[in-house]
Amino acid sequence: MDKQAVVINKVAWTVTVCEQEVRVPYQEFMLLAFLAERPGRVVSRSELVSVLWDGKEPVNERVVDSYIARLRRRLGKRGDDVIRTVHKVGYRVVDSSDSGGPAVVVVSPPGE
């Protein structure tokens, strides 16, 4: 595996960046995993709100921006490389085939 990879392990509930474990709170973990499971696909803020906050409480779409900013900081030097903003639309995680982009790997439980 690429030593520069970002690995989201849904079995162990861990995130590693460049082989170093990074502490990520639950909601940020879910956000990163959701985006990473759709590499290269732009996901709108409204879709992220409806899926991750499940309509249980009113959430402004700009809350997503705050979570993304915190998540990028936690990912350090890889944050901006991995999570890309699509202006006025939403966010996407780079596809590993993107030139110069780091590998993003999601480890899921069996059967998921």
Image: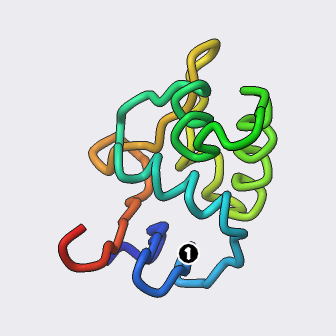
* Residue at the extreme front: 56
Which residue in the protein does label 1 denote? Answer: 15
Q: How is the image coloured?
A: rainbow
Query: Which residue is at a point 76% across and 33% down the rendered structure image?
Result: 59
Depth check, front residue: 45 or 72: 45
Q: x, y percentage for residue 87?
A: 62, 16
Instruction: Judge left or right: residue 47 versus residue 49.
Output: left
* Residue at the extreme top: 88
Task: Name the quadrant of the C terminus.
Answer: bottom left
Q: x, y percentage for residue 109?
A: 30, 78
**In the rendered image, the vertical position of residue 88 relative to residue 81, given as above or below:** above
Query: Which residue is at a point 38% across and 60% down the rendered structure image?
Result: 103
Q: x, y percentage for residue 33?
A: 47, 58
Amino acid found under the numbered disc labelled 1 = Val
Depth check, front residue: 31 or 101: 31
Query: Which residue is at a point 36% across and 66% down the rendered structure image?
Result: 106
Instruction: Judge left or right: residue 62 versus residue 48.
Output: right
Depth check, front residue: 6 or 32: 32
Task: Name the quadrant of the N terminus.
Answer: bottom left
Query: Which residue is at a point 42% across and 52% down the rendered structure image?
Result: 36
Give the structural element (helix, strand or loop) at label 1.
Answer: strand
Instruction: Judge left or right: residue 73 versus residue 107.
Output: right
